[in-house]
Image (cartoon, rainbow, N blue to C red):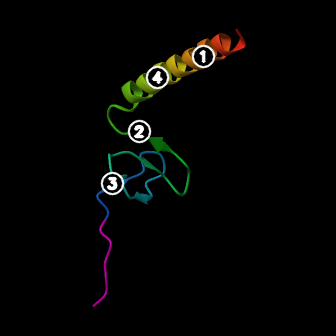
Amino acid sequence: MVAVDTYTRYCESCGTPVTEGPEGGYVCGACFHVVEPRGADEARKRRRIERATMVAEAARLRQLQRY
């Protein structure tokens, strides 16, 4: 038995068949066009806020250790 791939999405830029990621979105292997999944911007903003909070906390702890 031969496995046959059926593509449901094609690159918006060049028309090459693409495979969606687990949360949607894809990167075209031919032209490297990127389509991000829904909610990617909000998730990115949350991660930036979390990282900034962690950096501020680490700086505060370093300051406390000096004294």
Q: CA distance from mark 2 to mark 1?
A: 36 Å
Query: Which quadrant holds the N terminus?
Result: bottom left
Q: Is residue 67 left or right of residue 49?
A: right
**Number of residues whose C-alpha sits closer than 10 Å to that of mark 4, classed few (under 14), some (14–19) or many (20 or more):** few
N-terminal of the two: label 2 or label 4? Answer: 2
Q: CA distance from mark 1 to mark 3?
A: 49 Å
Q: Which residues are magenta?
A: 1-6
Q: Is residue 4 left or right of residue 55?
A: left
Q: Is residue 31 left or right of residue 25?
A: right
N-terminal of the two: label 1 or label 4? Answer: 4
Residue 16 placement (x, y as % from top left): 45, 58
Which corner quadrant of the image does residue 4 belong to? bottom left
The amino acid on which the numbered mark 3 sits, given as a three-letter code, is Arg
N-terminal of the two: label 1 or label 3? Answer: 3
Q: CA distance from mark 2 to mark 4?
A: 21 Å
N-terminal of the two: label 4 or label 3? Answer: 3
Residue 63 placement (x, y as % from top left): 67, 11
Query: Label 4's element?
Result: helix
Q: CA distance from mark 3 to mark 2?
A: 14 Å
Give the farthest residue toward the top.
67
Query: Residue 62: within the magenta?
Result: no
Query: Label 3's element?
Result: strand
Give the farthest residue toward the bottom.
1
Q: What residue would you read off at disc 3?
A: 9
Q: CA distance from mark 4 to mark 3?
A: 34 Å
Q: What residue would you read off at disc 4?
A: 50
**Number of residues whose C-alpha sits closer than 10 Å to that of mark 3, classed few (under 14), some (14–19) or many (20 or more):** some
Q: Which mark is residue 61?
A: 1
N-terminal of the two: label 3 or label 2? Answer: 3
